Image: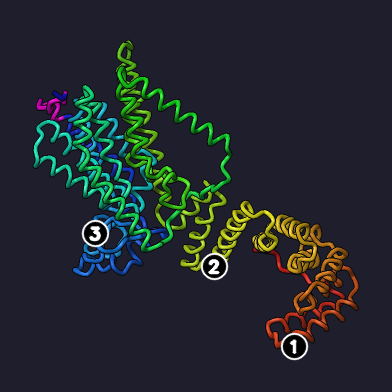
């Protein structure tokens, strides 16, 4: 017979349970209550809610049909979509209401986690600590503070309900209880696609703390018991893959993906560490089963987002740990309780460690949540953590444009293009055009020396590249800083640019004129400027005519042309 802790019934236990639930609610709202004053984020919140016409209309008959028959943001999670529709029905597009739903769901998930662990293990304090760390660990911020990550907190509730239903089924097996378990699992699968590995977690719980797997025959029976649940998960996986295949939608990223730039030694070290930890978990499976269960809980729930089966362009994301982290917390919590049993001042040590951990987590989580108050604060923080994050630059530029901060927006837009060019050059280091484009972007963003370096590389790869010749000559002739200008070399480069195929054009002649002026040969500057003016007139290049006329006037006054300093 399985050994399942009996339900606590004492008055003290009930009081403790109520106190823990109140504490969890208080600390969650202390940390995440601030999100009620936060705005939508211009990353996925748009396609999930405020720019999605099907969702923003609220609950409608056509919308209900659309939920079932279409993917949402390239994923099929109809219950998550319905929850967004319900929010729009109740709150409209006021972000406070949408944020409050996330916090309420996370709050409910934390309470259910405590109740389920208490029911499975009979350990009140350990269960309370695991639930509290789950509630306010800083890595929960992304899942709770980001409206588009509703699928995390909603699937989290159904995960806890699935565990609770499984506990009830284990205590008194029956068709109705198994059906309840199946319904909750199905709801989880319709909330988030990565719910597919949950049946394997139930097998882990059979080993510990439920202690149902006593022999081979019993293990075989338990596996057979999970087959309908595994089949349901497989069906949900097929639905998700089909939705992604049909929509062919682009998937999201937060942390830039390193692609093939990973250090092989770092990869091998990480693989070796995982193998060692896995072997240790297997080694301790008899003496300390919580190590085995906690570690494999972590691996099993993290598996769908490890990148082996890539579900997005991101390298990693804090939200991926929403449920997997419970396994690590459980492992550490039970290990601390177990290993300190013989300590003289065990109670004082454990209380001190728990207090410090909870206090630190609360402070850091609160601070992290403040970064999510709007798109500008979020992406500025993202760039402080990952400076070359192309996505962060792009979205910060969009947020700044929406606020009318055009100069700042343009700078970040160029920075995004710079990050993209650098990524391209990692894969194609001999791409002359990309080196040239990167040089232009760097100079526009004020990093003139880095821009010159890129043009020099372009000319090393192709000495006759007209764009690189012209761009480098222009900067050496007109840049406002004396330490950058070099009139003699500018003349050499610009003169060569006029000789390459297609080089004798107004823009290149304009550069050559500026180079002559910088070198002090104003007569040639005026003559070459006149040629540029004639060609521009013949080509009806009106945008260049007034510019060249102004520059010729400067040369007639023996004054070289100078570019304005970059912003």
Q: Residues within 10 Å of mark 2 (few under 14, many from 20)?
A: some
Asked if residue 49 is among those painted magenta in the image, a careful observer would answer no
Real-space CA distance between mark 1 and mark 2, rounded to the nearest whole angstrom: 33 Å
| Residue 312 in sight here | yes
Q: Are marks 3 and 2 in contact (CB under 8 Å)?
A: no
Decide if residue 508 is on the left or right side of residue 25: right
What is the basis of the colouring in this image? rainbow
Estimate the x, y position of residue 298 in percent, counting from the top left: 35, 35
Real-space CA distance between mark 3 and mark 2, rounded to the nearest whole angstrom: 37 Å
Of label 1 and label 3, which has the lower sequence position? 3
Q: Judge whether 283 appears above or below 168 on screen.
A: above
Can you say which quadrant of the picture contains the C terminus? Answer: bottom right
Q: What residue does disc 2 label?
A: 406
Asked if residue 5 is among those painted magenta in the image, a careful observer would answer yes
| Residue 121 in sight here | no
Estimate the x, y position of residue 114 in percent, counting from the top left: 23, 34
- Discs 3/2, front: 3
Q: Which type of secondary structure does the marked residue at label 1 adopt?
A: helix
Q: Are marks 1 and 3 in contact (CB under 8 Å)?
A: no
Q: Residues within 10 Å of mark 3 (few under 14, many from 20)?
A: some
Tell me what residue is drawn at x 80 percent, y 62 percent: 463
Q: What residue does disc 1 label?
A: 537
Q: What residue does disc 3 label?
A: 82
Q: Which type of secondary structure does the marked residue at label 3 adopt?
A: helix
Of label 3 and label 2, which has the lower sequence position? 3
Q: Which type of secondary structure does the marked residue at label 2 adopt?
A: helix
Q: Which residues are magenta?
A: 3-15
Magenta stretch: dominant SS? Answer: loop
Q: Nearer the viewer, residue 203 or 159?
A: 203
Tell me what residue is drawn at x 29 percent, y 42 percent: 28
């Amino acid at each position: 017979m399985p050994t399942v802790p009996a339900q606590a019934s004492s008055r003290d236990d009930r009081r403790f349970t109520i106190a823990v639930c109140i504490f969890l609610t208080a600390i969650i709202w202390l940390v995440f209550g601030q999100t009620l004053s936060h705005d939508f984020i211009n990353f996925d919140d748009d396609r999930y809610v405020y720019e999605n016409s099907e969702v923003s209309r609220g609950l409608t008959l056509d919308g209900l049909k659309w939920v079932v028959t279409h993917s949402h943001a390239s994923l099929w999670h109809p219950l998550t979509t319905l929850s967004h529709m319900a929010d729009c029905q109740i709150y409209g597009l006021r972000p406070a209401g949408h944020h409050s739903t996330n916090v309420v769901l996370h709050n409910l998930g934390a309470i259910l986690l405590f109740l389920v662990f208490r029911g499975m293990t009979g350990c009140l304090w350990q269960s309370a600590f695991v639930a509290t760390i789950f509630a306010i660990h800083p890595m929960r911020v992304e899942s709770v503070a980001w409206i588009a990550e509703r699928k995390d907190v909603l699937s989290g509730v159904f995960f806890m309900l699935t565990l609770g239903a499984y506990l009830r089924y284990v205590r008194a097996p029956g068709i109705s209880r198994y059906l309840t378990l199946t319904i909750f699992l199905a709801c989880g699968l319709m909330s988030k696609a990565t719910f597919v590995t949950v049946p394997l977690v139930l097998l882990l719980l059979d080993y510990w703390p439920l202690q149902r797997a006593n022999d081979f025959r019993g293990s075989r029976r338990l596996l057979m018991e999970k087959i309908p649940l595994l089949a349901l998960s497989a069906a949900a996986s097929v639905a998700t893959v089909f939705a992604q295949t049909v929509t062919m939608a682009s998937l999201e990223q937060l942390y830039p993906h390193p692609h093939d730039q990973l250090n092989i030694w770092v990869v091998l070290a990480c693989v070796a560490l995982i193998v060692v930890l896995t072997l240790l978990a297997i080694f301790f499976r008899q003496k300390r089963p919580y190590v085995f269960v906690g570690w494999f809980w972590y691996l099993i729930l993290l598996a769908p987002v490890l990148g082996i089966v890539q579900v997005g362009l991101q390298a990693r994301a804090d939200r991926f740990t929403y449920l997997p982290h419970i396994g690590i917390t459980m492992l550490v919590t039970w290990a601390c309780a177990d290993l300190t049993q013989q300590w003289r001042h065990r109670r004082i040590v454990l209380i001190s460690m728990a207090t410090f951990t909870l206090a630190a987590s609360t402070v850091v989580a609160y601070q992290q949540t403040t970064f999510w108050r709007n798109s500008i604060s979020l992406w500025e923080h993202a760039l402080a953590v990952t400076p070359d994050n192309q996505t962060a630059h792009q979205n910060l530029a969009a947020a700044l444009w929406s606020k009318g901060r055009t100069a700042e927006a343009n700078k970040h837009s160029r920075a995004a293009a710079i990050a993209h060019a650098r990524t391209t050059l990692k894969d194609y280091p001999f791409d002359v055009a990309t080196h040239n484009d990167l040089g232009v972007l760097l100079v526009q963003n004020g990093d003139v020396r880095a821009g010159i370096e890129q043009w020099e590389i372009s000319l090393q790869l192709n000495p006759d590249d007209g764009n690189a010749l012209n761009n480098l000559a222009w900067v050496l002739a007109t840049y406002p800083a004396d330490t950058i200008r070099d009139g003699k070399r500018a003349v050499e480069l610009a003169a060569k640019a006029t000789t390459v195929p297609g080089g004798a054009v107004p823009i290149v002649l304009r550069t050559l004129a500026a180079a002559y002026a910088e070198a002090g040969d104003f007569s040639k500057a005026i003559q070459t400027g006149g040629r540029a003016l004639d060609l521009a007139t013949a080509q009806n290049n009106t945008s260049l005519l007034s510019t060249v006329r102004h520059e010729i006037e400067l040369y007639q006054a023996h004054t070289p042309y100078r570019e304005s300093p970059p912003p």
